[in-house]
Each structure stands twice: as C-alpha cells, then as structure tokens.
C-alpha cells in the first residue's frame, strides 16, 4: 500500500478508503478542506501500487493498522469509504481495536450494502462506531 497524509498528526484522525479504479488521491479535495482540523490518512490499495502484490483484505487491514500505529494514531474521528472501499473499511472496522467515533459509507451502485441493507449513503455514529447506530 501507499499512504498519503494531509494535516497535522496531532489533530483527530480521519481515514479514507477509496473506490475501485482510483487511488487514495481521489479523496484529496475533501482532505484539503479538512486539513486545518483533522489529520487525514489516504491509503492506496496494493492493487493500485506498481511493484506490489495484493495479498488479500486481511493484509491490507494489517498494513493500515501498522501505518496508523507508526503515526501515533490511537483513535479515529471518522472513517470514510466510497464504493468498493466500503468492503475494505468493513474488514478494517471488524478487526481493529482502535476506537472509531463516526463511519460514513457511500456504497457501490450495485447490490445491497451490509450495514444498511440499502444503496444509499450511511453514517454510523456512537461512542464506538463499530457498535453505534445508523443515522441517515
């Protein structure tokens, strides 16, 4: 994976998971607007990194967690996922021990999405968003 960061690492962290066919850079416009208040982390999946071999979701999650630890991230204010990135985000959320305050999914246009059962954007919030409730 490749990781880009925007903002001050001392600020609350926001983690982005990109859609299919693009890289973490696709979230730069949003991250640039958040950079004064948040530390934005924009990973690019190994699938889109020349010279790297995709070894599965579990490996991607491991790489994200290692990167977050290396940056001193102990809590995520927000996890944002677009399209198929929501699939990797769900794997991350179900495996991570990091507290996550809010989750925003903009699911793919096909099929239903496991969090909401619908094809519409989903915001999950709570003390620990992995156990929070869906807000529309």
Image (cartoon, helix red, strand yellow):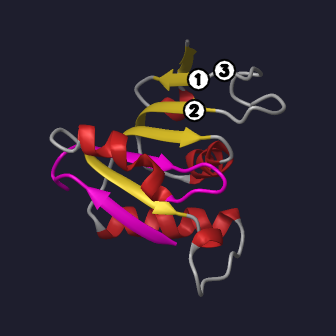
| Residue 30 against residue 106 in the figure, above or below | below
Can you give x and y, in whole percent of width and height, for residue 74 in the image? 31, 52
Give the SS element for disc 2.
Answer: strand
Can you give x and y, in whole percent of width and height, for residue 29 in the image? 35, 43
List the single residue furthest toward the top.
Answer: 136
Disc on the earlier residue, 1 or 2: 2
Residue on which the image places disc 1: 122
Among the 4 quarters of the image, the one containing residue 126: top left
Can you give x and y, in whole percent of width and height, for residue 103 in the image? 49, 32
C-alpha distance separating marks 1 and 2? 5 Å
| Residue 87 against residue 41 in the figure, above or below | above
Label 1 close to label 2 by CB (< 8 Å): yes
Dot 3, crowdedness within 10 Å: few (<14), some or many (≥20)?
Answer: some
Q: Which residues are magenta?
A: 1-23
Does the stretch in magenta take in 12? Answer: yes
Residue on which the image places disc 2: 105
Label 3 close to label 1 by CB (< 8 Å): yes
As drawn, is 103 to the left or to the right of 71?
right
Given residues 36 and 29, the one toward you in this image is 29
Of tags 3 and 1, the one toward the viewer is 3
Dot 2, crowdedness within 10 Å: few (<14), some or many (≥20)?
Answer: many
Residue on which the image places disc 3: 120
């Amino acid at each position: 994976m490749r990781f880009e960061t925007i903002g001050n690492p001392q600020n609350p962290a926001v983690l982005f998971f990109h859609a299919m066919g693009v890289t973490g850079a696709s979230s730069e416009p949003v991250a640039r607007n958040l950079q004064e208040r948040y530390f934005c982390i924009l990973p690019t999946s190994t699938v889109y990194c020349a010279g790297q071999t995709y070894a599965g979701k579990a490996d991607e999650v491991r790489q994200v967690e290692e990167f977050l630890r290396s940056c001193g991230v102990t809590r995520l204010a927000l996890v944002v996922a677009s399209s198929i990135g929501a699939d990797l985000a769900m794997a991350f959320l179900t495996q991570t021990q990091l507290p996550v305050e809010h989750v925003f999914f903009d699911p793919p246009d096909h099929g239903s999405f496991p969090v909401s059962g619908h094809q519409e954007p989903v915001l999950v919030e709570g003390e620990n968003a992995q156990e929070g409730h869906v807000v529309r």
